Amino acid sequence: IYLKRGTDLSSSWGDMSVYASPSDLHIDVASGQWGDTVKVSGGFPLTLPQEESVFCNFGKVGLPGRLDGQGSVVCTAPAQLRLGSQPLTITLNGQDSFGGPEFTYWSVLDVEPQLGSRKGGTQIQISVDGMSVVSGQLQCFFEGALPVEATLSDAGVLRCISPSMPHAG
């Protein structure tokens, strides 16, 4: 960056890098809870001169994010005071924000039953608050087993069948 006064050109004040504006932003997982990792794709720069200038803003709450070197920003969903959708924006320089997608917060209210056979086959019902229609496949994960398909009812209940488990516990 140079300053020109009249016909005199001053010495350089420093460098300023520019980047193409990210577009068509999308989130890999558009709903979850605080602490979840969220990846936002859409043509972000691979590197920045000041990596610490990347921020992820969920509504009015912002946390540092990071570039993954593949054109995406990785964020951690911060705690929120209310459930539901929050606009998600990414700031690369503290001034210019890029957004569009929303992140929906939900929470688990209850899990029934809390005990099942190691052989599997138990229908699990997980009552959730704040989760609405979601796109993509829902799955339940059980430690030590492959994920199983889950369904979400209109009443906010996730259902899945427990798989066979290699160990009791």
Image (spheres, rainbow, N blue to C red):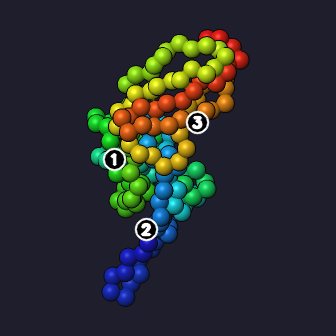
Determine the residue positioned at 37% across, 25% down.
109
Determine the residue positioned at 50% across, 37% down.
151
Q: Secondary structure at mark 1?
A: strand
Quarter in which the C terminus is drawn:
top right
The label on residue 13 is: 2
Decide if residue 33 is on the left or right side of residue 122: left
The label on residue 74 is: none
The reply to whether residue 132 is visible in this rendering is yes
Label 2 to label 3: alpha-carbon separation:
58 Å
Q: Callout 2: few (<14), some (14-19), or many (20+) C-alpha neighbours within 10 Å?
A: few
Determine the residue positioned at 63% across, 20% down.
120
Quarter in which the N terminus is drawn:
bottom left
Dot 1 amino acid type: Gln
- Residue placed most toward the observer, 101 or 146: 146
Q: Quick check: 116 above or below 129?
A: above
Determine the residue positioned at 61% across, 56% down.
70
